[in-house]
Amino acid sequence: MKNTREPYQNRIELLQGTLDLLILQTLQWGPQHGYAISQSIRGRSGDVLQVETGSLYPALHRLEKQGWVAPQWKQTEANQRAKFYRLTAAGKKQLLSEQTRWKQIVEAVAGIMNPARQEESP
Amino acid sequence: MSLWDWLFRRRQRDEELEEEVQSHLRMAAQDHSEQGESAEQARMSTAREFGNVLLVKETTRDIWGLRWLETLLQDLRYGLRQLCRNPAFTAVAVITLALGIGANTAIFSFLDAALDLSFPIRDQGRIVNLWGSNNSLGANRSSLSIPDFLDYRQQNRVFEDLAAFAGESFQLTNVAEPKSVSGNRVSLNYFHVLGVEPAAGRDFLPEDSEGGKPRVVILSHGLWETGFGAHPAILGRDVTLNRQIYTVIGVMPAGFRLFNGNADLWVPLDLKSSAFRRGTRQVMVIGRLKPGVSNQQAQAEIGNLAQRLAQAFPGTNNGWDVRVVRLQDEINKRVGLGLVFIMGPVALVLLIACSNVANLLLARASGREKEVAVRRALGAGRFRLARQLLTESMLLAVLAGAIGLLLGIWGMGILRFLLPAVVNGSSGVPHVDAKVLGFAALLCILTPLVFGLAPALRASKLDINEALKEGRRGRRASGSNRLREYLVVSEVGFAVVLLGLGGLLTRVMLVLGSVKPPFDPKNVITMTVSLSKTAYPHDSDVAAFYRRVLAGAQAIPGVESIGITDRLPVLGEDHGALTPVALESQPGSVARASAIVLRVSPGYFPALGIRQLLGRTITEHDLASAAPVALINETLANSWRGVNPIGKRLRLENLGPDVPLATIVGVLADGMVDHRNAPLSGVYLSYAQYPAPAMTFVVRTLTPARFLEPPLKRALWAVDKDQPIGDVRTLAQIVSDAWAGQRAILEMLVAFAALALVLASAGVSSVTSYAVAQRTHEFGVRMSLGARPRDIVWLVMKEGTPLIASGVVVGLAGAFALGRFLGHELGEIRPYDPLTFSGVSLLLMAVALLASYLPARRATKVDPMVALRYE
């Protein structure tokens, strides 16, 4: 299939599982609804990370099903009803372990991308 | 996620998701308009950013869902609509499959019943049969004598134990419906050796064979049900068997049948009597191997013992050996043959039905290309589409399965009618049970994979761009056509295999049927009677009874001649051992042979129309008081070529050394055949000199034979009003019953072959029709340019003929292979019988060509104008 379904040229594909981490991370400052979460991730990454709705909502619902976030229907600042997601206690634990895992991945990848230090060491 | 949750929270969750998405869209649109876009612009960019709302919702819903269940329900609904929209296609496909599934279900139920040997015997792998064998006599499934059995049992070190049994017919009287029941006399350890216990009551105990104790019997579950209405208080009850009282001590579990010992009751076999002779081979022997002992070890040990016995008792045991055969091997062989002859052909029919439906699906798929392409373009995955199409196939199969099961039940009725002689035993009746239902269900699952998988995968690989282009015409991509061509080749091939097999067996039966039996079976009625030892304790009583009945029956109007015999002249496959006989041509030198020995009355020969060749026949004067005489038949006389048998003395090994030798007084034409219609050596004795308690009256009548049944019975009851009467059959019936099994199998095969021929030609016809429909435009052009109808027909047939021809070739190869496998089952017919195979090939070519000619002719009926406009 050669049709072009790439709306954003500078979009970066998120690593598997990374989106969950980003969502949990975003929610640790307070409950948010889906739109705000996607805006927040986009803004904080300097427009580099575009979260597609087709990934965002399945991820949110997956986290909800795991019990890491809890849904809550509330009014927004603009007085609209929206579904807010709140980090649960289990979610906080999960966030900690995801953060640890992320650090390990970053270090491991960095080690591969910057092999100089290792080759010089013996 | 529970099913409950899924069922009842689904709607709420859907609504919430919808609201969540809408709020997202609203907020995004609001942000855009705050950045200064117009309302319309804002809506557009929001929509672009959000992407495919439906897809987002669907993938999100998947998180919660029993997604597969939802998809399945959706596919089923859609599939049902598709099937309803195209009733002609649905009907043809369902009927085709239902025929295949129905035939398979019926045959499966039959095989399951006939080969129902699934009764759990403890460590069945260790159970063996011991068959007597004697190369020089050509015997390899003979019984053993009781003295031999006892010696083997005592002296061997390889068996846990050996058990003996012998079939016997019992008259069950003093019940609502007196009847003849087949039973077994068994050694007391019989059930113990098999590792089977009565379902109620107890097994035999050592004291059960002691004299003075009450006689005991164990009933089969079937006899308990049919003979005693499954009466719960059966244990301890007295029943009358052969006019003796037996106490019921046990009932065996339902379904207990032994491979070669079908019986409805068991009584102890008295092994202590000194009357048993080593030459009388009358019991079948089974054994249980010790753990860890192989069949070969057992064979070696028993072979040694047999040799020792042959040295110790040369008169009776010379040349006799014992074969040790695992019960499991015998079962496997029989099941294997059943599969090849019966299940194989009907499975082929189902395969042909499947190819036909696959063909229909392929043809329909090309009509649905646009639909499939549109759905692909709208985002349906390839796997998703294939699954949807497979679900439709599954629906077809389930519908067909339901109808097929009904057809199958109907077919079981036909089988019950066709196969009374094959299906014996109360548990051996084809019927619907969990196993049969399971089999039908399995077919419903398997067949759509066979016929639906290829079309589904093909449709899912469709090139969307090509399919969506308007006005495509002419030949389709060749892949689909190639698949259809393979299907035609395989269908024709399968049909040839079936027709070939059916043809071979038909030839075998024709050869058998063209051999006239060596007696005249017309207008002869037979009636079997079995006298009990209690009512007729002495040989003279037995002889007197028969003499009086014969005298009475002789006077019945319509009786031309009447005689009695202890064996019918048509012998089944297991006609038991031939009796070894020895001719004392000169004192000291003997010529050995083996023969069937019959005890008959003088009237037997005229009743059967057996001609006298030499010497005299048996007369009224050959009584117990006179010197014993014997007649031999032509086949036996021929085996002693060069010796004039008249006046020579004949020793019958089975009767023991103290029985006076019979003098041969005459030679008769052959008068008996085995199940292959081959002549057998025979010796006839006078029943008055060698009486037997069970005899069969053979009556040649002047009127239709059946008319004489009531007066014959009256004549018998006039002598003894309490004597039960066994089997009453006409001789013609006996002859036809002897071949009933083979004939039934043949009839089934021919029916399947015919079904295969119809289905295969329908397949050829549908493929050709489809090809013609695709080329309507082309034919229009050709005809408007002056092509004659003949040319068009030739054009169409040119495509189909090579396919049909290659199908025939492939099928012939398969049929040859199968024929070679059958080998000796075919008798005189060679497995590559040219007559059969050329006939089959011609028949199939002719039918298939006709099947492709008809649609080809339709092509010529096309009005060129219409064809060209058809765009």
Image: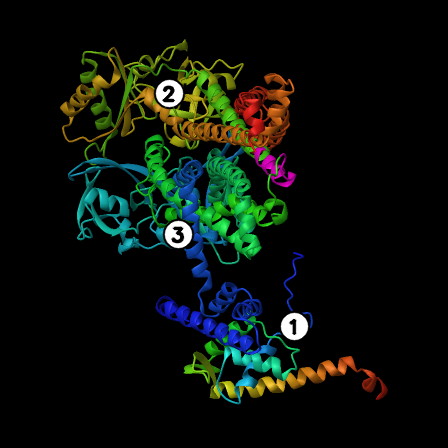
Marks 2/1: CA–CA distance: 99 Å
Q: Nearer the viewer, residue B454 or B413?
A: B454
Residue A29 can be seen, yes or no: yes
Q: Nearer the viewer, mark 2 or mark 1?
A: 1
Q: Nearer the viewer, residue B854 or B838?
A: B854
- Mark on residue B684? 2
Q: Which residues are magenta?
A: B474-488
Q: Secondary structure at mark 1?
A: loop
Chain for numbered disc 2: B
- The way the protein has been coloured in the rendering is rainbow
Q: Nearer the viewer, mark 3 or mark 2?
A: 3
Amino acid at dot 3: Leu
State whether the magenta stretch is mostly helix, strand or loop. helix
Residue B43: image location, x then y, percent: 53, 68
Q: Sequence order check: which comes first, mark 3 or mark 2?
A: 3
Chain for numbered disc 1: A
**Quick check: B735 left or right of A105?**
left
Chain for numbered disc 3: B
Check residue B153 for magenta coloring: no
Q: Nearer the viewer, residue B845 or B49?
A: B49
* Label 2–label 1 contact, CB within 8 A: no
Please give the residue where the numbered disc 3 appears in the rendered image: B194
Q: Residue at x 18, y 13 (%)?
A: B555
Amino acid at dot 1: Glu
Please give the residue where the numbered disc 1 appears in the rendered image: A13
Above or below for B376 versus B614: below
**Quick check: B251 left or right of A83?**
left
Amino acid at dot 2: Tyr
Q: Secondary structure at mark 3?
A: helix
Marks 3/2: CA–CA distance: 39 Å
